[in-house]
Amino acid sequence: MGKKKEDIKDELYGDEVREKLEEFAEKGWDAIPEDEHDEWFSRFKFWGVFHHRGGQESYFMMRLTNCGGVLEPDQLRAIGEVARDYAKGPAENPEFGNGWIDFTTRQSIQLHWLKLEDVPEIWEKLEAVGVSSRSAGGDTMRNISGCPVAGKADEYIESRPILDEIQETIRGDNDLASMPRKFNISVSGCRQGCAQDSINDIGLEPAHKFIAGEDVEGFNVRVGGGLGGREPREARPLDLFVRPEHAVETVRAFVEYYHETGNRTNRSKNRARFFVDEHGVEKIREDLDERLDFEFETAGTDFRGEYTYNAALRTEGQTFSEWVDATGHETLVELAEPEEVAGYEDPCLTDGKQSWYPFDDGESPAPTDASGEPLSADD
């Protein structure tokens, strides 16, 4: 299976898949040769397009990506409108009807019951407001996890610029599109551990260290974490402290290391957690030291004893209100309106499955629906 998957990716993968997907969409579902379904469906996943399972032929799910869970109101509105106009299955969801939206544990959104023929129009509408499905599935770097209120709340280290640079320069690098298996990255800048570094392939957690008499803020690095049904692992500490200015290059070095030397033959043992098992943290640290130009420091003091994994706690007078679970398109469009209410900023998705937290100053009224009633988790 490993060799077959790699042969499929070697032939065509990454950004180049889009043109072929659009060609199939123009010609229609039947244009995909039946004996090539598996290989094309495998490639489509890179662009976040997943064929529904047996009995649901010709319908697709689309997974979106938004680094660190941030969505601007116009983006949230566009997603709701796409769900309304295109996410229509053969039968309505018993709770949400047609056009429902699924929130994921990596701070993103999934749309179900899409037709292949509609995918180019969906992309056009979403990309017009800066929403993409690129690199949302398959053997590639998935949506980057961060504190859902990064840049909004009191962080020990400002993480939003780091998240954005990783997104643009590493996850956006097509040369790194084809990884041995899916690969998860997280960056936490707060003391709550919101980005859950322990279950990511590489995670940066805030820490500080006295260096030459100065208390320096930075990150400790952990690698090889993950859940999954097969032998979950907690990410192992590399005994490595990096300053914020070296954070992105450190992540890139480990991504490239796994990309170049990871197991591409045995898919049951080639996630990054098994890569760390095989090489060991001391060997990985040594090899990263050869790949990076700055002087390594041993791990600093972290804040793991304070972790709550919950960005919704009150912080310096700020509050974060949870409003929705999995929802229908009407509620999502309504929730895009907090931009017009004093005190509210961009909505943010959390890594708690099917929930999100808009930002609130603790005093302004909650956004309302079209009837003037406050929105709640029941809407």
Image (spheres, rainbow, N blue to C red):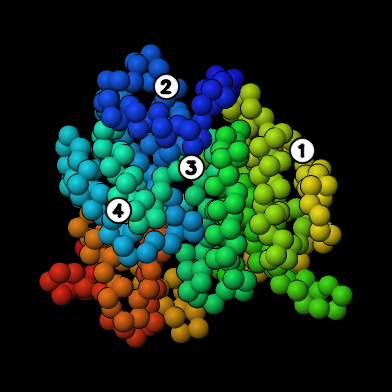
Q: Are marks 3 and 2 in contact (CB under 8 Å)?
A: no
Q: Nearer the viewer, mark 3 or mark 2?
A: 3
Q: CA distance from mark 2 to mark 1?
A: 32 Å
| Residue 221 rendering spot, x and y as whole percentages | 70, 56
Q: Nearer the viewer, mark 4 or mark 1?
A: 4
Whichever of labels 2 and 1 marks the residue nearer the N terminus, that label is: 2
Which amino acid is tagged 1? His
| Residue 88 rendering spot, x and y as whole percentages | 20, 41
Q: Secondary structure at mark 3?
A: loop
Q: Which residue is mark 1?
A: 279
Which amino acid is tagged 2? Asp
Question: Residue at position x 27%, y 59% from top?
Answer: 77
| Left or right, 86 with reference to 150 | left
| Residue 59 rendering spot, x and y as whole percentages | 27, 32
Q: Which mark is residue 135?
A: 3
Quadrant of res 324:
bottom left
Q: Which residue is mark 4?
A: 79
Q: Which mark is residue 38?
A: 2
Whichever of labels 2 and 4 marks the residue nearer the N terminus, that label is: 2
Using a 10 Å C-alpha cutoff, classify the residue at mark 3 as few (fewer than 14 neighbours), some (14 to 19) or many (20 or more): many
Quadrant of res 339:
bottom left
Task: Return the residue found at the far top.
Answer: 35
Q: Nearer the viewer, residue 71 or 191?
A: 71
Q: CA distance from mark 1 to mark 3?
A: 27 Å
Q: Nearer the viewer, residue 107 or 13?
A: 13
Question: Residue at position x 49%, y 49% from top?
Answer: 143
Q: Secondary structure at mark 2?
A: helix
